[in-house]
């Protein structure tokens, strides 16, 4: 099911690169139900729901990837500084993790968006930072277990550079599954943040650019006879949550 969710959202995002008519208002087909020409019908302004879903996927995919990258870099960086480097750098890393963890993830992301605007870039960075402390905890715990492991001591004894031991054997091999899970959670967090911002009064990505969140919020606010106008973006949010929990490695 998770693999299906990933494939479905990627297909929507790719189709959104060449989807005409997603922003075209046509009052003559307002609230039109599903048909052969409009597979998911139209919204209250007569805009095709399926085309808007495709564009919304294209809009959110870079934000999701940005959040995953920010979380991975921040989480791994803080975890390595804490458990591998130690000293002043480790103390500063622990303090940073504690400060970021003091606020709930959604609150931290909302504060960043309110301060710097609701662009996809802001949402990506804010969500990545909000999810980074949890990943840093997992990475630091795993590195602490391996720092004195026999294979690490043996590798040092053979003269293997410290950076290679850390980057490949410890971070990539030992911490890889945790990094994938943390980055995936951050990617899904962007979709949740977008939906939350849309319900808070349009603090996120503004119309006419569609996202799952503002499509769902508009459909519920304006109502209409076409249930697909709210059901389809709601389903995409669920699929994004499923996709963000999927990793190709062992759990």
Image (cartoon, helix red, strand yellow):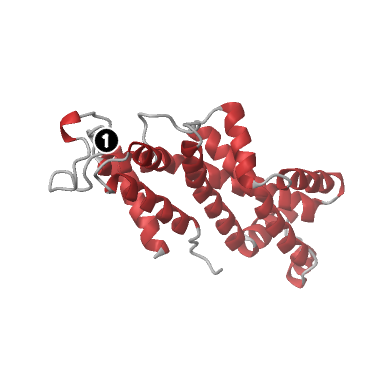
**Quarter of the picture holding the C terminus:** bottom right
Q: Around disc 1, counting alpha carbons within 10 Å, would you say few (fewer than 14), some (14 to 19), or many (20 or more)?
A: many
Secondary structure at badge 1 equals loop
User: Which x, y percent locates residue 190?
Assistant: 51, 44
Whether residue 73 is visible, yes or no, is no
Q: Nearer the viewer, residue 85 or 189?
A: 189
Q: Nearer the viewer, residue 190 or 150?
A: 190
Q: Residue at x 32, y 47 (%)?
A: 12
User: Which x, y percent locates residue 172?
Assistant: 61, 59
User: Which x, y percent locates residue 208?
Assistant: 35, 29
Q: Nearer the viewer, residue 77 or 187?
A: 187
Q: Residue at x 58, y 42 (%)?
A: 127
On screen, residue 62 versus residue 89, left or right, reads left
Q: Is residue 184 above or below residue 157?
A: above
The count of marks equals 1
- Find the residue positioned furthest to the right: 87
On screen, residue 201 versus residue 56, left or right, reads right
* Residue on which disc 1 sits: 44
User: Which x, y percent locates residue 132?
Assistant: 65, 48
Q: Is residue 144 above or below residue 96?
A: below
Whether residue 69 is visible, yes or no, is yes
On screen, residue 250 versus residue 96, left or right, reads left
Corner quadrant of residue 144:
bottom right
**Quarter of the picture holding the N terminus:** bottom left
Q: Is residue 138 above or below residue 59?
A: below
């Amino acid at each position: 099911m998770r693999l299906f969710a990933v494939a479905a959202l990627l297909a929507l995002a790719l189709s959104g690169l060449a989807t005409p008519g997603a922003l075209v208002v046509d009052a003559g087909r307002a609230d039109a139900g599903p048909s052969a020409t409009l597979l998911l019908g139209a919204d209250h302004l007569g805009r095709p729901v399926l085309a808007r879903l495709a564009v919304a996927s294209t809009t959110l995919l870079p934000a999701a990837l940005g959040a995953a990258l920010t979380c991975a870099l921040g989480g791994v960086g803080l975890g390595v500084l804490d458990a591998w480097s130690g000293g002043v750098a480790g103390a500063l890393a622990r303090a940073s993790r504690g400060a970021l963890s003091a606020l709930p993830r959604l609150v931290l992301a909302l504060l960043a968006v309110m301060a710097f605007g609701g662009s996809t870039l802001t949402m990506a960075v804010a969500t990545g930072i909000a999810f980074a402390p949890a990943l840093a905890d997992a990475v630091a715990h795993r590195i602490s277990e391996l720092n004195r492991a026999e294979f690490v001591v043996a590798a040092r004894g053979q003269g293997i550079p410290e950076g290679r031991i850390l980057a490949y054997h410890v971070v990539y091999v030992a911490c890889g599954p945790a990094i994938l899970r943390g980055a995936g959670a951050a990617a899904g967090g962007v979709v949740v943040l977008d939906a939350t911002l849309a319900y808070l009064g349009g603090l996120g990505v503004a119309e006419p650019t569609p996202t799952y969140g503002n499509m769902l919020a508009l459909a519920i606010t304006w109502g209409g006879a076409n249930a697909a106008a709210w059901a389809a973006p709601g389903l995409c949010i669920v699929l994004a949550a499923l996709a963000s929990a999927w990793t190709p490695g062992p759990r």
